[in-house]
Image (cartoon, rainbow, N blue to C red):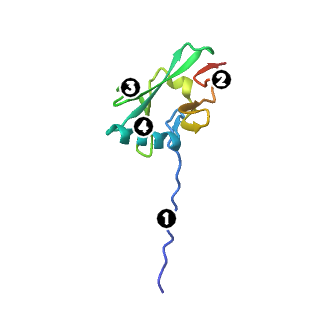
């Protein structure tokens, strides 16, 4: 009598940082394409700054390396970085890439944002 081993169950779960911040697969795919175009890996650095029409605004930059104290969020080998001061403002957020008729851009889906401006870059927190 032969025994048949079932195939191992493989679950694909988005990796979340302990603070609940996740880099969506859409953003990871875009970062991979940008890295291929540049000829080297690129990282997305996300920060929250004071300003904008709603009180806070997101700052997003493509960088080659992060700071030693940055929070690293990785999905499919691609990395987003968040500076430690911005982490509390981004807890539970998703960093995604959207490509719509109105335009293509990285976006932050932030459950902490009480209001946001029409451009999606500026927000306020209760």
Q: Categorize mark 2 by other alpha carbons within 10 Å: few (<14), some (14-19), many (20+).
A: few
Q: Position of residue 13 (x, y in %)?
A: 53, 48
Mark 4 or mark 2: which is in front? Answer: 2
| Image coordinates for residue 41, horizontal then vertical, percent | 35, 38
Whether label 3 touches label 4, CB < 8 Å: no
Q: Disc 3 marks which residue?
A: 69
Q: Earlier in the sequence, mark 3 or mark 4?
A: 3
- N-terminal of the pair, mark 4 or mark 2, is 4
- Using the numbered discs, state the Cα–Cα distance from disc 4 to disc 2 in whole angstroms: 27 Å
**Image marks 2 and 1: residues in contact by CB distance under 8 Å:** no
Find the distance from the CA under tag 2 to the CA under tag 3. Answer: 32 Å
Residue that mark 2 sits on? 118
- Residue mark closest to the camera, 2 vs 1: 2
Label 1 Cα neighbours within 10 Å, binned few <14 / some 14-19 / many ≥20 = few
First in sequence, mark 1 or 4: give its number: 1
Q: Which mark is residue 79?
A: 4
Q: Tell me which label, 2 or 1, sits earlier in the chain.
A: 1
What is the secondary structure assignment of the residue under circle 2? loop
Left or right: 41, with 86 as reference point: left
Q: Residues under labels 1 and 4: Cα distance?
A: 28 Å
Residue 8 circle label? 1
Q: Where is residue 92 shown, x and y percent of the image?
A: 58, 33
Nearest to the eye among marks 3 and 4: give it: 4
Total marks in image: 4
Q: Which residue is found at the position 56% from the left and 29% from the top?
A: 91
25 up-or-down from 111: above or below: below
Mark 3 and mark 4: span between their CA atoms? 14 Å
User: Is 126 left or right of 56, judged from the image as shown?
Assistant: right
Crowd rating for badge 4 (residues with CA inside 10 Å; few <14, some 14–19, many 20+)? many
């Amino acid at each position: 009598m032969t025994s048949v081993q079932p195939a191992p169950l493989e679950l694909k779960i988005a990796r979340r940082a302990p603070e609940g911040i996740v880099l969506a697969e859409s953003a990871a795919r875009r970062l991979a394409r940008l890295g291929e175009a540049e000829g080297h890996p690129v990282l997305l650095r996300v920060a929250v700054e004071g300003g904008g029409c709603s009180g806070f605004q997101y700052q997003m930059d493509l960088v080659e390396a992060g700071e030693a104290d940055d929070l690293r969020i990785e999905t499919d080998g691609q990395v987003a970085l968040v500076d430690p001061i911005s982490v509390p403002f981004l807890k539970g957020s998703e960093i995604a890439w959207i490509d719509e008729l109105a335009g293509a851009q990285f976006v932050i889906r932030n459950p902490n944002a009480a209001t946001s401006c029409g451009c999606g870059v500026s927000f306020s927190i209760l």
